[in-house]
Image (cartoon, grey):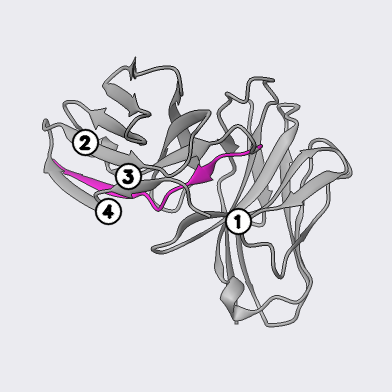
Amino acid sequence: SQQGEEDPQALSIQEGENATMNCSYKTSINNLQWYRQNSGRGLVHLILIRSNEREKHSGRLRVTLDTSKKSSSLLITASRAADTASYFCATKTGGSYIPTFGRGTSLIVHP
Amino acid sequence: EAQVTQNPRYLITVTGKKLTVTCSQNMNHEYMSWYRQDPGLGLRQIYYSMNVEVTDKGDVPEGYKVSRKEKRNFPLILESPSPNQTSLYFCASRRSTGTGHGEQFFGPGTRLTVL
């Protein structure tokens, strides 16, 4: 069962612009994580936000979590061509051992 | 270097010929898992393991087997592969944190084609 669903499915922007992608989920979570995947490669962990946190930053990344709306957003500021990748949210509920992934957002940053 | 390794990276095989994809991690992680990734479907859990000799089914376990005889290894076995198992497979591992807050480390992926 896929808990998180990313939106949009695809996003195309110019270098220097900000990129925002969203994740909605259905049941209460323990934490929510964002991962990046370069084409055909393994996923790389970006950031984890716990259910009692509302916002976290890491470099050019900003993640927000709204548990009342069961949604999260990932903002990449001042995007670069190297940010071109697919981005996945993964949700972990209290009763599960490993997180469940969404279908991902494909981001293309044009130089 | 902390890592998850998978072998082989690429495999083309025929229907019905048993195969094993190996996964190994050097971080002493308790949790290990297998996912398959298909276009438009994202990553789906196949099996996971909480520790040695403890495994459980994920969302799409049919046609797969796993074993966890050693902490570092978690092989994925396809006893009789079929074309619908053509996919990109990822192994991942995670430390047991007690709080449940821990990132997963992914292997580089195994691209399997079953003819």
Chain identity of mark 4: A
Q: Position of residue A58 (x, y in %)?
A: 35, 18
Q: Residue at x 40, y 43 (%)?
A: A25
Q: Which residue is mark 1?
A: B9
Looking at the image, residue B106 lies above or below residue B84: above
Q: Nearer the viewer, residue A48 or A54?
A: A54
Q: Left or right? Give the position of A72 relative to B109.
A: left
Gap between marks 3 and 4, in whole Å? 12 Å
Image depth: mark 4 or mark 1 in front = 4
**How many marks can you see?**
4
Q: Which residue is mark 4?
A: A9
Q: Left or right? Give the position of A10 relative to A24.
A: left
Gap between marks 1 and 3, in whole Å? 20 Å
User: Is residue B83 highlighted in magenta?
Assistant: no
The amino acid pointed to by label 2 is Thr
Gap between marks 4 and 2, in whole Å? 12 Å
Looking at the image, residue B104 lies above or below residue B14: above
Q: Position of residue A103 (x, y in %)?
A: 40, 53
User: Is residue A106 highlighted in magenta?
Assistant: yes
Chain identity of mark 3: A
Image depth: mark 3 or mark 2 in front = 2
Mark sitting on residue A85: 3
Residue segment shown in magenta: A97-111
Mark sitting on residue A20: 2
Q: Helix or strand or loop: what does disc 1 sit on?
A: loop
> Nearer the N terminus, badge 3 or badge 4?
4
